[in-house]
Amino acid sequence: MLETRHVSAAYGKLDVLSDVSVRFQKGRLTAVVGPNGCGKSSLLKAIMGFLPVRSGDIFLEGEPVPRIGRKKLARRIAYLPQDCFCPDYMTLGELIELAGYARYSLVGGPSERDRALYRQVLETVGLSDRADFPVNKLSGGQRQRAWIAMVLAQDTDVILMDEPVNHLDMKYQFAVLELVRDLTETHGKTVIAVLHDLNLTTAFADDVILMRSGKCLTAGPVAETVTTQNIEQVFDLRTQIFRRDGRLVCFPERAGHATVS
């Protein structure tokens, strides 16, 4: 569905992506993982056209993304950046309505179908009783779910999320990622999410892309890709990886300490 072929990109003279070729599988949750500054966020921005591509190609269902108009692209790919902001006066309901701008005509606003969709997504994220609340008055976990609701209200088949659980405590990290996981399993969305935590990755993702220094070192299903050798190559960190309750658990080794059996 979505594919990059030999993509390289830079901020001025600073190279941030180098010859990145990855294919994102339809209807699956793919985690993009790697150390800080390795190009994870830059990859999403390049896909969206926010970061100019020096060389290579990006395709959506076989169509070059740069040839897709911005409004048409907004009907096909939703993007949630790391940090989201809105005016203090804006309510959750108003925020959700903004998500449908790509479907509105020049003289019209939300249709009845749109309004039904907005009610549905608020129920999906558990905020149906908060539509009249100012977004900035919501709790941290509610606010993150509000931004996810806005992405859902955009009603696209592909969703890009840059660190969707950043700054959240463990409870809300799991709540948000369970919601994101449900987007693929129940709603058939293709989700690409930048994550830092390997154990959250193995708990929720279908596939993983491991990046370092602007390059994709390896990509594939979680069980085949998250290995001790790959993690050491990406993070310079020795780990033990074992299976617990049907999923992989990554246990870092401390230098100079005996490993736990």
Image (cartoon, rainbow, N blue to C red):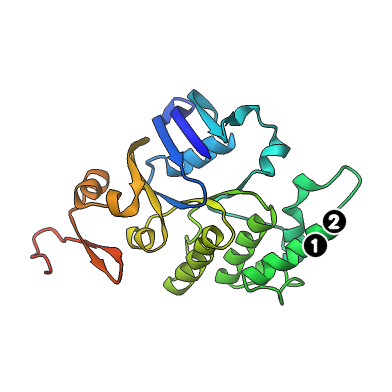
- Indicate the secondary structure of the residue bearing disc 1: helix
**In this picture, residue 128 sits left or right of residue 195:** right
Residue at the image position 54 percent from the left and 37 percent from the top = 47
User: Residue 160: percent from the left, percent from the top?
Assistant: 54, 48
Residue at the image position 39 percent from the left and 42 percent from the top = 37
Q: Which mark is residue 111?
A: 2
The answer to whether residue 35 is visible is no
The answer to whether residue 58 is visible is yes
Residue at the image position 61 percent from the left and 55 percent from the top = 84
Disc 2 marks a residue whose amino acid type is Ser
- Toward the viewer: 198 or 114? 114
In which quadrant is the C terminus drawn? bottom left
- Toward the viewer: 121 or 83? 121
Q: Residue 128's image quarter?
A: bottom right
Q: Residue 65's image quarter?
A: top right
Answer above or below: position of 74 versus 237: above
User: Residue 113: percent from the left, percent from the top?
Assistant: 80, 58
- Toward the viewer: 24 or 36? 24
Answer above or below: position of 129 versus 72: below
Residue pointed to by mark 1: 115
Q: Are marks 1 and 2 in contact (CB under 8 Å)?
A: yes
Disc 1 marks a residue whose amino acid type is Arg
**In this picture, residue 28 sits left or right of residue 103:** left
User: Residue 30: percent from the left, percent from the top?
Assistant: 44, 50
User: Residue 156: percent from the left, percent from the top?
Assistant: 65, 49
Q: Which mark is residue 30?
A: none
Number of residues whose C-alpha sits closer than 10 Å to that of mark 2, classed few (under 14), some (14–19) or many (20 or more) = few
